[in-house]
Structures are given as C-alpha cells and as structure tokens.
Image (tube, grey):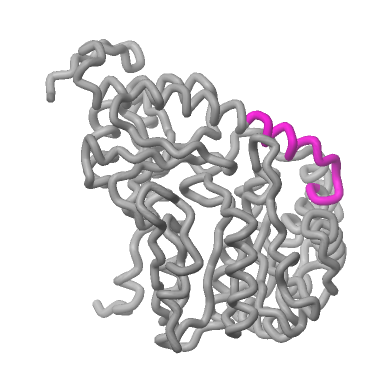
Amino acid sequence: MSLSKLAMKIAESPTLALNSKARSLREQGKPVIHLGAGEPKTKVPASAILSAAAKLTTGEIRYTPTKGIPTLINAIIKYTEKNYKKTVAPANVVVSAGAKQAIYNLMMTLLNPGEEVIMLAPYWVSYPEIIKMLYGVPVTVMPPQGSFEPTIEGIKAKVSEKTKAIIVNSPNNPSGVMYSAKLIQEIVEYCEDKGIYVIMDDIYHKLIFDNKTWPSPFAYANDDFESSYLIVVNGVSKLYAMTGFRIGWTIASTKVCKVMINVAAQNTSCPSPVQQEAAVGALNGNQSNVENLRLTLENNRNIMINELKTIPNLKITVPDGTFYCLPDFSAYNKNSNELSQFLLEKALVVSVPGGEFGLEGHLRLSYCGSVKDIMDGVARIKWALDPDSPKEIYIGDRKIIRDWK
C-alpha cells in the first residue's frame, strides 16, 4: 500500500497523543494528573449556549457563506475595534473552523513550495508541521540563553530571499511569556518595510497577568490596511473556553482574504452555522467569563510557580499570561521526551516535552486545571526527581516507594 511521502513525514500531534494516553490510563482506573492540557476547565458562556440552541431549534441548519455569517463578521469587527483599536471592513475578515484551520488556510494562501516561514522558539507544536504540509520550510529563531524572547537581530539573521512570513504567538504557548511592545514594534515595522507577512497568533491575547498591557500590533502597521503585511489570527477557543466549538478567524487585507475564502470553499465549504452562532453569543454577550477565567488562571499560575520553586535546580521563568509555564528541567534530564515519559510512568503526571516546541530540556506544564491537581502534580514531580524528597508518596490510594536514583 502506497501512501503520501509528505503525509508520512508529518509528526503526530504530541498534545493530542498525550491526551489520548492520559484518557486511556484513566479508563484503566489510574489516578493520572494531566498537567499537559491545553483547554480551560471553566464552562462555556451561557450566551454562547443560548445562541447555539436558538439556531438549532429553527431546524434550518444549512450552508453559510464560506467567509462566515454576517452577524459573526460584525461581532469580530466590533471585537477588533475594542481590543485592537483598529477598524476593519467585512472584506478583511474570514471565519474558519478554529484558529488552527485559519493558520493552515493562511499558509496555503501565502506559501509557494520552498518558501520559508520564520518561527520564534519556543513555538506552538503545529507551526512546523503545517508549514511542511504545504511544502514550505520552517526556520527557527532561538532566543538568547536563559530567555524566551527572541531579538530582532536574531530574526533578521534568519531572513533570506525565500522568507515569506514570520509567525508570532504572544503571549506564548508554551512559555507564557508576552513579548515586549518594543519587539512587536520592531517585528511589524521590519516586515512592513521588507514586504514579509507577519502573522500574529493572538489566541491568548486577553489572558494577561500582573496588570500588564498587551500591545496591539496594529499600532505599528501601515495605516492603509490594504497595503499592510500584518495578519491577525484569533478565535473563541481559549478566552471563552470554547475549544470544542472550533471557531477562529483571520484579519487580513482583502487580497489575502479573497484567496483564503477560495481555499476554505474547497476544503470545508463553511464553518458550522450552529458553532458560528455560539461564537456570536460569546463575543456579544457578557464578558465577565473572560475576566473570571483570567483571574482564576493568574491565581493558578501563582500556586504552580510557588510549588515549582520547591524543586531544587529547576529554572523557572514566570509566565506573563496563557495557562502554561515552561520550566527548565535540564539538571535532571536534557532529553525532554525521556523525562516526560519517566514522569508519566513513575508519577502518573502528564507533561509535554519541550523538544516539541523547539527547546530541549524543558517541560510544558499547564495550570488551567484544578488547584488540587496543580499541587498534587508538582508534588509528584518533586518526589520523582528530587533525591532529598521523602521516598514514599501516595498516588491515589496506593503508597509508592521511590526505588531509583
């Protein structure tokens, strides 16, 4: 049986694989703690549920315009005006089945075979695979040692005549670090000057802590949006805990959006009308859910960081936002995949290897679960790694003795 050589090279999604492994262990009755999760545990906003239900009760669930229903387009325009201080037209908006599909369709729109896309490490695990699926070449920019923020000099050093785009995710999955306004300004202005697309993956942009201010990239872009190389991707998955609804969107020039619509028309026809109505309800409804989630995550972050500080030789960068942190476990094992598997086997704690994000020796830990899971999970990690911690621990109702060095 012959299969696509390209498809065979695409890596399995590590986060989805870990979710599957954790689910399997739980079904076996194992007391697994999942610190690798990438979705909030809060409830979907009532306004989203009511909007979806109202659409369902009509019995008229049909095709919609490929670019999205007008009410959702208008809600996204208002959202952009309020949060980005930028007015865009309906022709500048394309709705998709999640922000991941937005990025995929966008890459299909932009890339020719062999063209390069610059990624800033640590980067989201899907970026390199999406780029390769469309015959592009992912190019990684590493941050300075001990930092999660790259420099404009490091970025410029990786630019070549084949560079088509730079993708920026801030606040960042997996580190939780928010890039400085200075760096965002430097990247946007440089790309506008050089004719390089700058794709802002803003899916976490309102989950910011410590009263910090998130910089809108539009502040540094060309005033004439139709000639701008700035592209913004966002969605309802993270802020509204609507990961299963799969609604995202792209804000771009009319030229880019027209081609994106053609791409989407040939792969999904349109996003689900029920899910689009749910997104309208979320965007137009009471926004207290977002602030409540942000406050919960900030509290959870503080708890996780305080617990992690009890583990010797761990290097920690405090996240500015999101619901992830990326501690450096190199003192224990520089191979992040081996370490992640070890913790799952010995302590029944799920983590995501940092190598998947372009930074070996690190593990991504999520604090979007319960406080109990955070505290118990970190306690298990410490027990498994720190030789000076007590040799015995209860995992579920079983007492486990550490019998390794």
Q: Which picture quadrant has residue 1?
A: bottom left
Q: Is residue 143 above or below residue 87?
A: above
Please state the extent of the stretch shown in magenta in the rendering. 282-296
Question: Residue drawn at (41%, 57%), measured in percent from left and top?
Answer: 143
As for residue 386 lying within the magenta part, the answer is no
Q: Residue 353, how many percent across, how many down?
A: 33, 46
Question: In front here: 56 or 239?
Answer: 239
As for residue 292 lying within the magenta part, the answer is yes
**Could you tell whether 269 is left or right of 13 in the image?**
right
Question: Residue drawn at (31%, 12%), measured in percent from left and top?
Answer: 394
Q: Quadrant of the C terminus?
A: top left
Q: Is residue 116 above or below residue 55?
A: below
Name the chief secondary structure element in magenta.
helix
Q: Residue 213, how many percent across, how many down?
A: 70, 46
Q: Which picture quadrant has residue 162?
A: bottom left
Question: Residue drawn at (47%, 82%), measured in percent from left and top?
Answer: 163
**Could you tell whether 90 is left or right of 318 in the image?**
right
Q: Is residue 63 above or below residue 247?
A: below
Question: In front here: 126 or 83?
Answer: 83
Q: Residue 331, how many percent across, how many down?
A: 23, 36
**Could you tell whether 94 is left or right of 72 in the image?**
left
